[in-house]
Image (cartoon, rainbow, N blue to C red):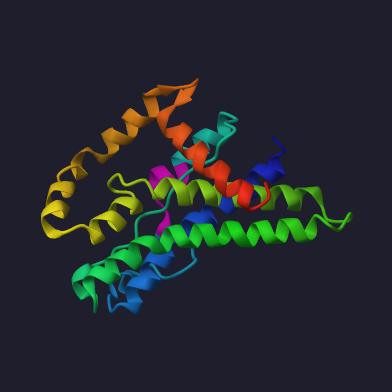
């Protein structure tokens, strides 16, 4: 891979996961929770958001191994739902904020790509960077919608379940990582179940965005 393009991809990934987390905090603030603000997490400065594994180690290993997929995450923004002016609605919108931010970034990047692609003088590197920005944000958005703790999809579902069902659903939280690993290793058509589901939905969104 072109070293310049690889560096740009790392920066795009970092920016995308930071926007994802910051939006959780921004929407939480709108509902009256200042936890993220007090922790200094409502900033695009990457330093407070760095997770040693998800932001540094995993992307570095994928980069060094010339993996065709680049992935990672930032440190989760602290949120206290007890401070929300409307707990049920607040939990729903705060949980959905990161996913919606990623889908919004994908749409903006797709529009820029299709617009700039009409100009022959547009640098190929820029077009490839925008294409990657579309893909990585679709990956982040779709993956985080999985209803498996601690992903955002589980929090969205939890916020809407009746109290008794919510309590039962919370019991799987300690096993969320193991469930994800199982999905990663269950074979389906030459790939894993996790990759198959991701690929299916990303394919649909990519087609809608003209990719």
In the rendering, at what x and y percent does residue 20 appear? 45, 59
The residue closer to the viewer here, 8 or 131, is 131
Residue 166 magenta-highlighted: no
Determine whether, in the image, residue 17 is placed left or right of residue 211: left
Q: Residue 194 at x, y = what percent?
A: 41, 33
Total label count?
0
Give the quadrant of the N terminus: top right
Q: Residue 65: which quarter of the image? A: top right
145 shown above or below 111: above
Residue drawn at (37%, 72%) of the image: 27
Q: Residue at x 28, y 66 (%)?
A: 91
Q: Nearer the viewer, residue 107 or 125?
A: 107
User: What range is drawn magenta here?
Assistant: 49-56
Residue 147 picture location, percent across and down? 32, 47
Residue 113 lies, in percent from the top left, at: 72, 56
* Residue 6 location, quadrant: top right
Instruction: Return the residue nearer the eye: 150 or 77.
Output: 150
User: Going 47% across and 39% down the picture, which residue do you hit?
Assistant: 198
Main SS of the magenta part reads helix
> 78 left or right of 104?
left
In this rendering, the answer to whether 10 lies above or below 45 is: above
Left or right, residue 33 beside residue 137: left
- In this picture, residue 40 sits left or right of residue 102: left
In this rendering, the answer to whether 39 lies above or below 65 is below
The reply to whether residue 46 is in sight is: no
């Amino acid at each position: 891979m072109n070293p310049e393009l690889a560096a740009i991809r790392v920066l795009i990934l970092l920016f995308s996961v930071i926007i994802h987390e910051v939006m959780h905090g921004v929407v939480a603030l709108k509902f009256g929770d200042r936890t993220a603000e007090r922790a200094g997490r409502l900033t695009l400065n990457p330093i407070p958001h760095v997770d040693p594994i998800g932001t540094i180690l995993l992307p570095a290993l994928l980069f060094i191994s010339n993996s065709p997929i680049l992935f990672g995450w930032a440190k989760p923004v602290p949120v206290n739902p007890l401070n929300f002016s409307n707990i049920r609605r607040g939990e729903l919108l705060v949980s959905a904020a990161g996913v919606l931010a990623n889908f919004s970034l994908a749409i903006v990047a797709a529009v820029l790509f299709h617009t700039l692609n009409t100009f022959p003088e547009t640098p190929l590197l820029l077009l490839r960077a925008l294409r990657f920005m579309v893909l990585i944000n679709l990956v982040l958005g779709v993956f985080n919608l999985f209803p498996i703790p601690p992903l955002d999809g589980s929090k969205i579902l939890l916020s809407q379940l009746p109290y008794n069902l919510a309590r039962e659903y919370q019991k799987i939280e300690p096993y969320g990582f193991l469930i994800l690993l199982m999905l990663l290793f269950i074979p389906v058509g030459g790939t894993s179940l996790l990759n198959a589901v991701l690929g299916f939905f990303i394919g649909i969104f990519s087609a809608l965005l003209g990719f």
